[in-house]
Amino acid sequence: MANLHVIDHPLIQHKISLMRDKNTGTKEFRELVSETAMLICYEATRDLPLKTIEMETPLCMARTKIVSGHKLAFVPVLRAGLGMIEGVTSLVPAAKIGHIGLFRDPQTHESVKYYCKLPDDIAERDVILVDPMLATGNTACAAITELKRLGVKNIKFMCIISAPEGAARIIQQHPDVDIYCGTMDEGLNDDKYIVPGLGDAGDRIFGTK
């Protein structure tokens, strides 16, 4: 799967292990989500284009590189995706932020959109869609479809834990979207939760267990 990137950095694996622990409290869990999102984002932005500029150092003039003004937006899937925003924007503070609200129908497991607020120039931006868990892929695919409907051409999806079923669904429905995740788990249980997973990421981020 050329467009699936599992980031196996030791720090990411360590932080995910701490998140899995049912005894990890809300404050620590929230911090771990943010820190892990920042580390995965480091890899997801590896292909940002650069341009060469000249500037004066304390010693001399230097030719050096900066990001070439690429327009970027982060779009968290509400509500759990909000937990990743502080981490990713710490790397790219100039990025704009949009929001897509989707919930999974408990009977059909299909995604239902209830909110969408994006920057006015979203069609001109590269978008990184963020959600801690990629389970069935229904929610991610619905969010990607909505972004494409609004004219977004370059989309990446970033999560902390993925199930094989969810990754396969994105690759099948949106083969032009790269997926960046911290780990690939075993699969889904009968209730469509990732196993072994870490429980409900939204509840654990916001303390609503």
Image: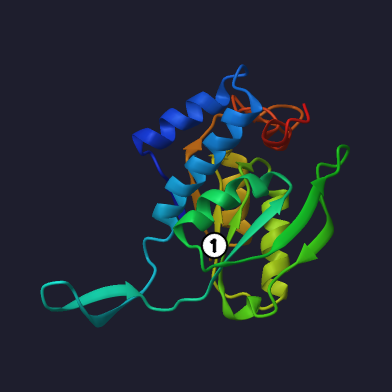
Crowding at label 1, few (<14), some or many (≥20) Cα neighbours within 10 Å? Answer: some
x and y percentages locating residue 21 in the rendered image: 57, 20
| Residue shown at the point (42%, 32%) measured from the top left | 13
Q: Looking at this rendering, what residue extends furthest in the top direction? A: 23
x and y percentages locating residue 35 in the rendered image: 48, 41
Q: Looking at this rendering, what residue extends furthest in the front direction? A: 58
The quarter of the image holding the C terminus is top right
Residue picked out by circle 1: 177
Q: Is residue 11 left or right of residue 135?
A: left
Q: Is residue 39 left or right of residue 58?
A: right
Q: Toward which corner of the image does residue 59 lie, by quadrant?
A: bottom left
Q: Toward which corner of the image does residue 6 lie, by quadrant?
A: top left
Q: Is residue 84 above or below residue 60?
A: above
| Residue shown at the point (66%, 78%) measured from the top left | 151
| SS state under label 1 | loop
| Residue shown at the point (40%, 53%) measured from the top left | 42
Considering depth in this image, is 1 or 69 the residue closer to the camera? 69
Q: Looking at this rendering, what residue extends furthest in the left direction? A: 59
Q: Which amino acid is tagged 1?
A: Val
- Is residue 117 visible in the rendered structure shown here? yes
